[in-house]
Amino acid sequence: MRALVLVDLQYDFCPGGALAVPRGDETIAVAQRLLPHFETVIATQDWHPREHGSFAANNPGTAPGQVVDLHGLPQVLWPVHCVQGTRGAELHDALPKERLVVFRKGTDATVDSYSGFFDNGHRNATGLGAWLEEKGVRQLYVLGLATDYCVKFTVLDARELGLDVWLVEDGCRAVDLAPGDGERAIAEMRAAGATIVHSGTIAP
Ligand code: VGL
Ligand code: ZN
């Protein structure tokens, strides 16, 4: 069985948001077009407490974009974003909430969680992997934000778990802190066995 996975389609990652991804809102129309073709639709949601360690504001003397050591893991620092209960953390209103099975991540202030499956230290699971296994889902079609962070690590973990993955390239946008990060992320996902597809091959 297959499922569509919508990664972090939240206001803070869209233009005007706290961690705006260039043209991030263009992913929404792709998600809307694919949704009717899937019985099972997962949405991941970045869901941080205000004191999250990935926020530059919580690391005195730092600025967003800087890399620090966060409890033993390298951590890119970000602007305050996707704080639990704020508008910026909400999934985009254009998505049919009643159709989505939502998995939240990044709730532990001491570790970031780019992947929809595990935190960045691979210590705690979100429950997504167990849920997919219970439902017999082995094929994932993934799109969302951002290509070079949460999409990439979700896809790499899915491959490690032995799932088949199709990355819907036109449904993704990258942060591109360094130019080319998005392209390099796609190359990494391909090297890990993900198939890169255009949404038009799924929903003509
Ligand atoms: C993300 C940076 C920080 C993402 C989330 O959704 O790609 N990136 N938190
Ligand atoms: Zn985050």
Image (cartoon, helix red, strand yellow):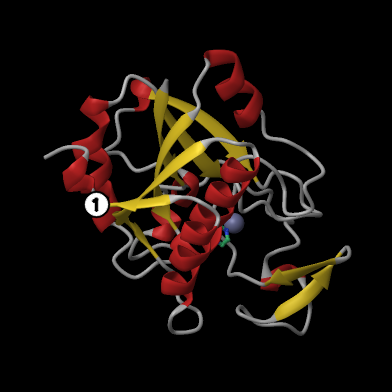
Residue drawn at (64%, 37%) of the image: 161
Residue drawn at (23%, 46%) of the image: 199
For the residue pair 48 and 144, the one nearer the viewer reads as 144
Q: Is residue 38 above or below residue 71?
A: above
- State left or right for residue 157 relative to residue 196: right
Q: Residue furthest left?
A: 204
Q: Which residue is mark 1?
A: 198
Q: Is residue 18 in view?
A: no
For the residue pair 183 and 113, the one nearer the viewer reads as 183
Query: Callout 1: few (<14), some (14-19), or many (20+) C-alpha neighbours within 10 Å?
Result: some
Q: Locate ligand 1 by image quadrant.
A: bottom right
Percent coordinates x, y for residue 170 in the rendering: 27, 57
Q: Is residue 127 above or below residue 16?
A: above
At mark 1, the secondary structure is loop
Q: Residue furthest right?
A: 72
- State left or right for residue 74 relative to residue 141: right
- State left or right for residue 196 relative to residue 52: left
Residue drawn at (49%, 53%) of the image: 151
Percent coordinates x, y for residue 164 in the rendering: 48, 37
- The N terminus, quarter of image: top left
Q: Is residue 71 in view?
A: yes
Disc count in the image? 1
Residue drawn at (88%, 65%) of the image: 72
Place residue 37 in its image quadrant.
top left
Percent coordinates x, y for residue 65 in the rendering: 61, 80
Amino acid at the residue labelled 1: His
Q: Is residue 195 above or below residue 97?
A: below
For the residue pair 36 and 169, the one nearer the viewer reads as 169
- The C terminus, quarter of image: top left
Ligand 1 closer than 8 Å to the CB at disc 1?
no
Percent coordinates x, y for residue 106 in the rendering: 67, 47
